[in-house]
């Protein structure tokens, strides 16, 4: 929704974290949040089942090991991304 997209841009990390965790957040909003500087927001994005496989592909190269590990566990992950993670 437009409201969630606006909240995803909030300066308060807690607000962005709630949006990233919310099960009804649209995949395009999650894609924007995947670039968040805060690792907790990125960790929440990677656990959201609405996330695009393309977003998971990007997060598979995240500097945070937890984010990379959870990419492999998300049901939306592509076989190509899984292969990349296995290397």
Image (tube, rainbow, N blue to C red):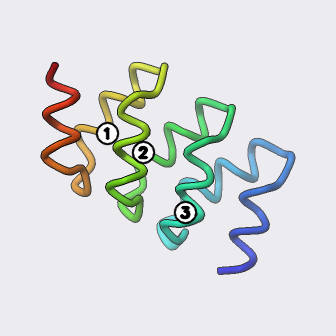
Residue displayed at 24% across by 50% down: 77
Going by the image, does 64 lie left or right of 29? left
Q: Nearer the viewer, residue 40 or 60?
A: 60
Query: Which residue sits at x=55%, y=45%?
Result: 34
At 40% from the left and 65% from the top, the residue drawn is 50
Task: Name the image quarter holding the C terminus.
Answer: top left
Pointer 2 local density, CA inside 10 Å: few below 14, some 14–19, many at least 20: many
Q: Which residue is mark 1?
A: 71
Q: In the rendered picture of this protein, how many numbered marks are placed on residues?
A: 3
Q: Are marks 2 and 1 in contact (CB under 8 Å)?
A: yes
Q: Of helix, strand and loop, which one carries label 1?
A: helix
Query: Mark 3 or mark 2, which has the lower sequence index?
Result: 3
Residue identified by numbered label 2: 46
Residue 29 x/y as whole percent: 59, 63
Q: Look at 34% across and 43% down and name the residue there.
A: 57
Quadrant hosting residue 32? bottom right
Q: Name above or below for residue 66 compared with residue 43.
A: above
Q: Given contact means CB atoms under 8 Å apart, are the residues at marks 3 and 1 in contact?
A: no
Picture disc at residue 22? 3
Residue 28 pos. (x, y %): 54, 66
């Amino acid at each position: 929704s437009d409201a969630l997209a606006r909240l995803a841009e909030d300066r308060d990390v807690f607000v962005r974290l709630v949006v990233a965790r919310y099960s009804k957040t649209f995949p395009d909003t999650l894609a924007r949040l995947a670039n968040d500087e805060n690792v907790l927001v990125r960790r929440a994005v990677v656990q959201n089942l609405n996330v695009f496989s393309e977003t998971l592909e990007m997060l598979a190269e995240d500097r945070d090991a937890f984010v990379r590990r959870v990419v492999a566990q998300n049901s939306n992950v592509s076989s190509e991304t899984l292969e990349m993670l296995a290397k």
